[in-house]
Image: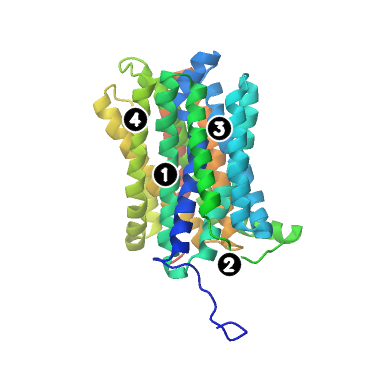
Amino acid sequence: MNAGGGVTWAGHVPGTGGYRRLQLALFLAGVATFAQLYSPQGMLPLISADLGVSAQDAALTVSLATLGLALGVIPWSYAGDRFGRQRAMGWAIIGACAFSAAAVAVPALEAVLVLRLLEGAALGGVPALAIAYLNEEVHRASAAVAAGVYISGTTVGGLTGRIVAAPVGDLLHWRLGMLAVTVLAVACAVGFLVLAPAARRFTPHRASFRQAIAALTGNLRSPALLATYAQGMLLMGGFVAMYNYLGYHLAEEPFGLPVAVVSLVFLAYLAGTWTSPLAGRLAARYGRPAVLRAATVLMVAGVLLTLLPTLWAVLPATVLFTGAFFAAHAVASGWAGAAATAGRAQSASLYNLGYYAGSSVFGWLGGVFLTTLGWPGTVLMTVGLALAALAVASLLLRRDPVR
């Protein structure tokens, strides 16, 4: 009951029009965001050949976008507090589509990279605000299921951006591959703007500078939370490096595969849709520390198996390290919220900051190892990052915060 004697609205529930609209809107937002973010990844060899640049320079089209997203998530979280999650997400998606369209049109790589950085900063508004918007507008009993729909949208988006852009780019031109994904993202953005229900439980909040800093620094004083943020940074950095440069490896002997065929390797992403919820169930049974360490060890095994010079080894290995990464990510990201000491939203933003900063820095650095040492160099870097994450987890993440 509310103060006036009426029944307080508790949020959208399954079976209602508002619930279905919100689910579909957030699914489309996830597709629009992650399709654009990673669309160049499968076309990096084409970008290298067309512009005459190295693998690591071509990879900046991905790294600078993820860097922009990393820098954008925290400011967007405060914009959402002040102006509303739904409104801020709409601004974010529209801005990202505009920057994406501009990046396709400019001729010089330097201009493309600047626009990709801005596009990533705009895209940061979706992961920064989607779960908060959902938790405010959906009934508590249904929030976990609704969140799963949004996460599936991010997975589908990341996969779609790669497998749509690469075949179009291989057949026509890499810029047209990116344009095809931009058109898809615009359609999804329109769907989000039309379908997203108006906020009914949002209360504007304008934090002072001191409050904003306190919400961040309070979490940064926890060694366990710093360790979870490091998991995201180190594991994601190696994971993105593997996918950035796997296309170069498979285009060379003894494989000699065209870009359009290599893009099908990204179907391994579907392993994450199975291992993420499985990791959650296993963590509930055996505890987060054990599952996180086991997933990291399996990721290392998968990465090492890609050194074998046969597709019969590389393809299953890619599925293994992909599934293991998403399992570890699911555990670590949940841990960042469960162990938060000064605000769960800010802890999630800090995890995202580390996650996408790792993607940006190590996703680029893997190309330096590739140029210097070949594919074994990229593998060596990724294994080193994963072992560092394992050491940090073993030392600082021994006790599950919910047990």
Number of the front mark, 3 or 1: 1
Q: Name the residue that disc number 4 marks.
A: 264
Q: Gap in Å between the C-alphas at discs 4 and 3?
A: 21 Å
Say the numbered circle drawn on residue 330.
none
Number of the front mark, 2 or 1: 2
Q: Name the residue that disc number 1 marks.
A: 155
User: x and y percent of residue 237 in the render?
Assistant: 49, 37
CA neighbours of label 1 inside 10 A, class few (<14), some (14 to 19), many (20+): many
**Which residue occupies 31% across, 31% down?**
305
Number of the front mark, 3 or 2: 2
Q: Name the residue that disc number 3 marks.
A: 63
Say the numbered circle drawn on residue 200.
2
Q: Is residue 399 visible?
A: no
Q: What residue type is labelled 3?
A: Ser
**Which residue occupies 36% across, 19% down?**
258
Q: Gap in Å between the C-alphas at discs 3 and 2?
A: 37 Å
Q: Gap in Å between the C-alphas at discs 2 and 4?
A: 42 Å
Instruction: Determine whether the residue tagged by mark 4 lies in a helix, strand or loop.
Output: helix
- The tag earlier along the polypeptide, 4 or 3, is 3
Q: Gap in Å between the C-alphas at discs 2 and 1?
A: 28 Å
**In which quadrant of the rendered image does the C terminus lie?**
bottom left
User: x and y percent of residue 19 in the render?
Assistant: 45, 62
- The tag earlier along the polypeptide, 1 or 4, is 1
Q: Which amino acid does label 4 sit on?
A: Leu
Q: Are marks 2 and 4 in contact (CB under 8 Å)?
A: no
Report the front residue among 223 and 135.
135
Q: Residue furthest bottom?
A: 5
